[in-house]
Image (cartoon, rainbow, N blue to C red):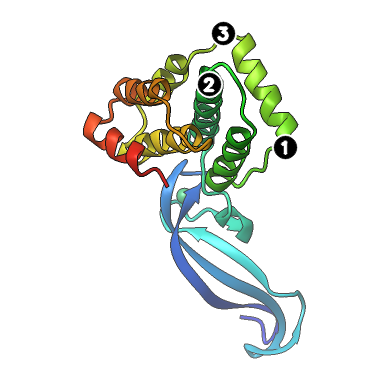
Amino acid sequence: MAILGPIDRIKPLKEGSFFCPKCNDQTEYRAKEVRRWFSLMNLPLLPLTSPEGVVECTICNGTYEMNVLDAKLNEDEQAFLENFEKAILNAMLLLMISDGHIDDTEVQTVIEVYAKLTDKKLSREETLAQAEHVLAAGHTLNDYLLSIADVLNQDGKQLIIRSMSLVAAADGKMEDAERNTIVECAQIIGLARTTALQILDNPS
Ligand SMILES: [Zn+2]
């Protein structure tokens, strides 16, 4: 080691699991803060850089900037999430229009439930436009539910039925037609009828 020269001082920050882009998998990481100092006999005299956070994968030793920890989802998961969000939205919209008219409280409930689930705030206009879109495209609830039924776990299935039930109950009364639609949807995605009925009776 040089008597006079730069050294890196390393401070451990935290550990956990993250999605490593190189491993393309969920792995364990070590995060540390690195700062380069000008030093004399290993004694830091003068900071040469500002502290920099580094995330290191414990499997492949790849290093990344700290913001890699924010990217929790890989492309497949991202695609699934978008698909799932779309399915929930369209399921609610198709239910909303299934009784032949669009009620303002229903629109409001769709917006509220969607915002709660996805952190995305739709305007009234966007919501109505999307409802028109799914109607014009001739989409049915079955299309959407079938496309995601296989990959949904129990929580996901219950979330779909709960979202639909909230919309159905939004105008103060749950009509038989709405109730039947929801029970049918539960069947399509493979949710037990008794569970669906429990959610229907107490959706909030
Ligand atoms: Zn890795």
Determine whether 53 is above or below 189 in the image.
Answer: below
Q: Nearer the viewer, residue 124 or 35?
A: 124
Q: Secondary structure at mark 2?
A: helix
Q: Name the amino acid, label 2.
A: Leu
Q: Amino acid at mark 1?
A: Ser
Give the percent coordinates (x, y) of residue 188: 33, 20
SS at badge 1 = loop
Point out residue 63 in the picture as x, y percentages from the top left corner.
Answer: 56, 56
Return the residue at label 3.
138
User: What residue is at 60 percent from the left and 37 percent from the top?
Assistant: 105
Q: Which residue is mark 2?
A: 94
- The quadrant in which residue 202 appears is top left
Please name the residue that numbered disc 1 is placed on: 123
Relative image position of residue 11 (x, y in whole percent): 56, 78
Residue 40, compared with residue 48, is above or below; it is below
Label 3 vs 2, first from the N-terminus: 2
Q: Is mark 1 within 8 Å of ligand 1?
A: no
